[in-house]
Image (cartoon, rainbow, N blue to C red):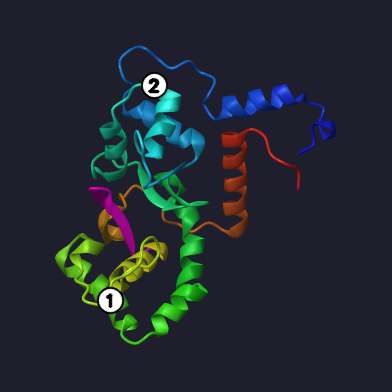
Amino acid sequence: MNPKDTPYSLSALRALALHTQGLTTPLGTDEPPAEEAIFEIVKRLGSIQIDTLQMVQRSHYLVLWSRLGKYFPAEFDRLAYNPAQRRIFEGWQHAACYIPLDEHRYQRPLMRRLRAQPGEHFRHWLAEPGNEAVFHAVLDRIRSEGALRAADFEYNGPKRGSWWDWKPAKTALEHHFAIGDLMISERVNFQRVYDLTERVLPAWVDTCEPTTEERDRRWIDDAARSLGVCEPL
């Protein structure tokens, strides 16, 4: 956005963006905030990106620290993984993120589209010999045994590369996750633990799929509230 195209000064726009992102409040020196305050930060931001990389701490914990100051990361983890306290979930926005559970229904149109029309990479993977059987077998095993990690599925093939060169069971698990069959019930040493959506998603969550117009309006409202400043269309 060119500052000359708006009646607001660049300094005002910067201040607005910092304020809506929760970065203008001095960090507290009192007792660490309770679970409700942590959840309100997640809701205010709309989502918090999950990052596996860390130096001092994983980045999603640092996002909260920069807004709250000292807090107990375990309180945040309980919001995502404790069935009695679960109010956020792992899902996809611009990347893998923690998202408030009242946003879950707005993910459902994408889940339905990916189920009907998988991406090119997954279509190619599914066409390889044996992979379709793996795709069905991992879901059947979780259905009968309960929540499992990718590490719980044996792999006897050739050594694989890092990052996205997953073993077949991991690829199957991630696609079931993308289309809504599975959710992340917890993490063990930061490894995802997958379980059936009906066993993870709280009963109070609205699962009615929105129309495209309702979804887009919700996301525009969320973006405006979370970012404060945007470029005109």
- In this rendering, is residue 95 above or below 60? below
Q: Amino acid at mark 1?
A: Pro
Q: Amino acid at mark 2?
A: Gly
* Closest to the observer, 211 or 3: 3
Give the mark nearest the N terminus, 1 or 2.
2
For the N terminus, which image quadrant? top right
Check the image and name the residue furthest to the top: 30
Secondary structure under tag 2 reads: loop
- In this rendering, is residue 144 above or below 78? below
Q: Dividing the picture into quarters, in which one does residue 231 lie? A: top right
Residue at the location (47% across, 42% down)? 47
Say left or right for 186 vs 211: left
- Residue 158's mark? 1
Tell me the magenta residue range. Answer: 180-191
* Closest to the observer, 154 or 232: 154
Say left or right for 195 vs 233: left
Is 187 in the magenta? yes
Residue at the location (41% across, 56% down)? 207
- In this rendering, is residue 118 above or below 208? below
Residue 64 in view of the camera: yes
Is 14 in the magenta? no
**Residue under pointer 2:** 69
